Image (spheres, helix red, strand yellow):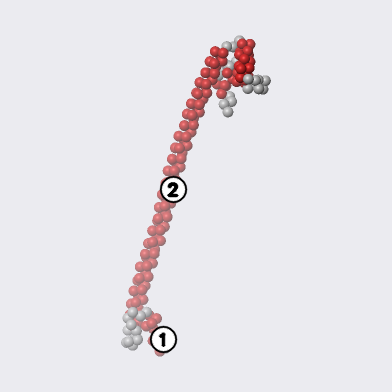
Amino acid sequence: MLKGWFDFSKRPPRSWGIAKAMDMLNSPHLAGMSSEAKRCALLMALEAADTGVEALIQDAVLQQRLLDQQEEQRQAKLRRLEAAKLEQNRAVQADLDRLTSKHLARLQANLDLIARHQDEFRAWQKQKQQEAQRMTDAAAFCVPHGHVSHSATLSVVMEPVRARG
């Protein structure tokens, strides 16, 4: 998981440090040994390499600081990425809102146009009814009285005329 974090230190690869101590303690050669036996083996290896415990501890502290720095850098990078993506999302949402508004306006314009044409059609129908009534009233004067009421339609008015014909 944290492989490679030791690369941040600038020491030669074969020098003794906390990474080498970790590798040694996880070696299959020490598997199954007690903690005390592993501790003695580590101290013996440090002595053979002419490295003291203090140097190992200092390296561990340094490596921990490097890990902390890397965490801060990664966290800062993540924050920048989040901020950029959130800004992109705001821009996309603004475009979406603009398009939605534009299309809703088109939908409303279509509905308004339909309503206007429906109103015009109803007005025409009313004029048609009035014109038909005027024709019926005029035609009613052409047939004998009493055969047609003034509320009759033209076809009712014309019925006695057709019957004669």
Residue 94 in picture, x, y percent from top left: 42, 43
- Residue 141 vertical placement versus 115 (above, below): below
Identify the amino acid type marked 1: Arg
Rendered residue at 65%/20% (across/down): 33
In-image side of 111 versus 19 (left or right): left
- Between the C-alphas of marks 2 and 1, the distance is 64 Å
* Disc 2 element: helix
Residue 82 in picture, x, y percent from top left: 47, 34
Residue 163 in picture, x, y percent from top left: 41, 88
Q: Quadrant of the N terminus?
A: top right
Residue 162 shows which numbered tag?
Answer: 1
* Disc 1 element: helix
Category of crowding for the residue at label 2, using alpha-carbon neighbours closer than 10 angstroms: few (below 14), some (14–19), many (at least 20): few
Q: Quadrant of the C terminus?
A: bottom left
Residue 99 shows which numbered tag?
Answer: 2
Identify the amino acid type marked 2: Leu
Splitting the image into 4 quarters, where does residue 86 fall? Answer: top left
Q: Which of marks 1 and 2 precedes in the sequence? A: 2
Q: Residue furthest bottom?
A: 164
- Please name whichever residue, 105 or 9, is drawn nearer the observer in this view of the structure: 9
